[in-house]
Amino acid sequence: MHLVGQRRLPVDRERAWSALNDPEILRAAIPGCESVEKCGDDEYVVVMSSALGPVKARFRGRLKLENVVALESYTMRFEGEGAAAGYAKGAADVTLTGEGMETLLDFRAEAQVGGRLAQVGSRLIDPAAHKLVDEFFAAFEKLVR
């Protein structure tokens, strides 16, 4: 699965960067997220619940930030297991560009799913991923104002 997009955030780049690195803001913005806990330098343990068609599961996984350039960009690697539901793993490149009191956030993500999730098929997975991204940014924008 491949996702590419750009969002205009209603805050300056410093505020956007701070929020993207705040576990509590991320927990509140990620749909179905139960917890985001720091477990090392630029590394987090995440627990979330999700449903995709007939597959409902609670996922436990890790997020790791790499190639960090403060206030500008990072790569977020993620992997999670949902027991019988399967797994998801991938990476997302995030870049921030300041435009006065606003920030452009560009992202490019690649993800793979396996197990029962993969059996659901891209016909359901792709629209669900786009919906998840839209819901995340809607919540995130409210939280950073």
Image (cartoon, rainbow, N blue to C red):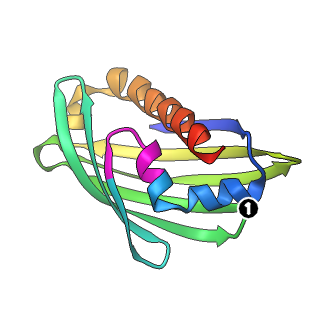
| Image quadrant assignment for residue 67 | bottom right
* Residue 18, quarter of the rendered image: bottom right
Q: Is residue 76 left or right of residue 100?
A: left
Nearer to the camera, 122 or 134: 134
Residue 14 spot, x, y in % from top left: 74, 60
The residue to which callout 1 is attached is 72
Report whether residue 115 is seen: no
Spot occupied by residue 48 in the image (x, y as percentages of width and height): 28, 47
Residue farthest toward the left in the current orientation of the protein:
84
* Residue 59 visible at all: yes
- Total tally of numbered discs in the picture: 1
User: Is-magenta flag for residue 27?
Assistant: yes
Q: Residues within 10 Å of mark 1 (few under 14, many from 20)?
A: some
Q: Within the magenta stretch, is there residue 1? A: no
Q: What element carries label 1?
A: loop
* Residue at 33%, 22% in the rendered image: 124
Q: Split into 4 quadrants, where in the image is the C terminus?
A: top right
Q: Quadrant of the N terminus?
A: top left
What segment carries the magenta color?
A: 26-34
In the image shown, does 49 or 90 lie closer to the viewer?
A: 49
Q: Hey, what amino acid is under mark 1? A: Glu
Residue 68 in the figure: left or right of residue 131: right
* Residue 12, x across and y down, in percent: 78, 51
Give the residue drawn at x 49%, y 46%. 110
Q: Residue at x 60, y 54 (%)?
A: 93
